[in-house]
Image: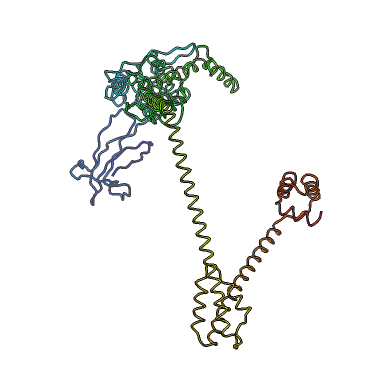
Amino acid sequence: LVEFVPRPTRRSSLVLTNRDQKPPTGTFHRAAPRDTAATMAVLTAEQLSEPLTRLRIGYDPALVPAGGAEIIGQCASPLADAMPSNIEAAGRGFHEKILIKTGAFASREDLHRSQSAAKLSRKASVASFQSDADAQENDPNYQGPKPDIKIGNMVWEDHYDIMGLGRERHLADAEAIRVAYRTRSLMLHPDKLITPDTTEEEKERLDDRFKRLNTANELLNDTKKRRVYDSVDAPPTKLPMKFETEDFFEKAIPAFQSLVRWFDGKGDAAKFIESDPAASYEKVRKMYEFWAKFKSWREFPHEDEEDLESAEDRWGRRQIEQENKKKREKKKKEDTDKIRRFVERAEEKDPRVIKKRLEDKEAREAKKKAKGAGKREAEEAAKKAAEEEAAKAAAAAEEAKAAKANAKKELEKQKKALRKEKARLREQSARADGWVGHPGEDDVEELANSFSVQRCDEIKALCDEIEANENEDAIVAVLTRELAKLEGAKSEERKAAADAAAKRVEVESKEEQKSAPWDDEDEIKLLDKACNQKFPMGTKDRWERVAEYVCEHGVRPRTAKEVMTRYKAGL
């Protein structure tokens, strides 16, 4: 059991006791120096036998000290004997005095030497990068920081080296920058490196190094500033202009690849570099279409530029930015022209483009040669082909004429057969003439006329059926049935016509309901002017043009039917 035992002097001691079924008797404690103001509390058997409701902890009975209790720690007391009555030590000074008072150190000098040794040990383990095998400082191939870049009044340090990204440089992404800054800021923070023995010069150096780290981090996380820095950090754009078809792939393709990083647009410009000598011309054509429109984001700071930080307000900053942009435009234009000339030169010397142009030239020459040498043959062939086409057309016309004549004959034949069958129907119907229920000659004639050429087989079958019946009642029944069918067909036609008329009336009624009223006097004047002055009677598409005029100058759209109905209703 761990508990704090309060003392009348407001001092307490940390006590470790054993709580068992039977509380241990007696006490055991470590004696503290008599000359300290701290007092060690001793627990008696009676105190240990009192009910304890405090936190219990597991223990090993074999480790219980003799007497059952042991004082293992104590709270430091005020240093009344070492300080004036109105002053009490606090903070680091308090801890130093306690350590010296308790005999841990003989003097303050010994304490400081111990602290300096610990601090230097930690500094060696933190500030150095020997423990990080991947650090640029441990790479034998890393050549160290680049010299400062100076353009006019502007100076850039090697910010990538400061951030530990001297090898990655412009290839370092946002995550790599974040990790590098976090690692270096923890390792190079002055609070972890400055000791009491650190000289002012060394403190200033450590502070300056950390400030440079923050400056580098701020620059690399600002897109505009980083673009400017990457532009001056990279070597000048060197594009080959003197190369031929033989060394195109050795010189031009790497130059295209060096421009990829400067592409100011979406996507990856590397996709538009065709390094395969056997690539199709379509891919090569797309490649040069892309690079002909290539736009670089590279900046070219001018030596006479003004510092943006010198601006007093936002307006002044904008003015400085515009002036600096104008000063950069000349070199920017030169760089753009250099890229354009290189792309034109590359397309001119690309063996794949040359091959395609040669093939096209040969095809044109072959066509021209064939056209010049075989002009007569071509004319004769064309004449022969025209004669053949004319002969085919004449034959087709004759066939069409014959087919039309045959169709006419066939139609006449069918009409003749129909007339014959109609006469037969009248003849067979007359057998039951005067019989009860006979429809009469007019109805029989109407029935006969209802059959068309296409229904010749039907009337023939009807005549055969009537002819087969010797009974007059059967003949009358057949005629009555056919006339009923005819009447039913007529009824269906009349019904369909009535439905169509009703539907048309309904549609017209709905259109009239949808039509807005002519309640505007100005609109009626417009209609009068359009009908009597602009588009009088006899004008082509009169009502459509009147509607357009009213719509253009009026307050609401009108259709040709609306203006026509309203005009005829009277203005």
Coloring basis for residues: rainbow
Q: Can you say whether 415 is above or below 33 in the image?
A: below
Q: Position of residue 350 (x, y in %)?
A: 37, 22
Residue at 27% across / 36% down in the picture?
Answer: 72
Q: Quadrant of residue 163?
A: top left
Q: Residue furthest left?
A: 62
Q: Position of residue 534 (x, y in %)?
A: 78, 44
Q: How many marks?
A: 0
- The front one of 442 and 322 is 442
Q: Quadrant of the N terminus?
A: top left
Q: Can you say whether 469 is above or below 157 in the image?
A: below
Taking the image as drawn, is residue 116 in sight? yes
Taking the image as drawn, is residue 190 in sight? no
Q: Position of residue 398 (x, y in %)?
A: 49, 51
Q: Is 104 left or right of 498, judged from the image as shown?
A: left
Q: Is 334 left or right of 78, judged from the image as shown?
A: right
- The front one of 101 and 457 is 457
Q: Can you say whether 456 is above or below 23 in the image?
A: below
- The front one of 367 and 3 is 367
Q: Is 175 left or right of 531, judged from the image as shown?
A: left
Q: Can you say whether 557 is above or below 508 in the image?
A: above
Residue at 31% across / 50% down in the picture?
Answer: 51
Q: Is 24 left or right of 385, judged from the image as shown?
A: left
Q: Position of residue 570 (x, y in %)?
A: 81, 56
- The front one of 431 and 35 is 431
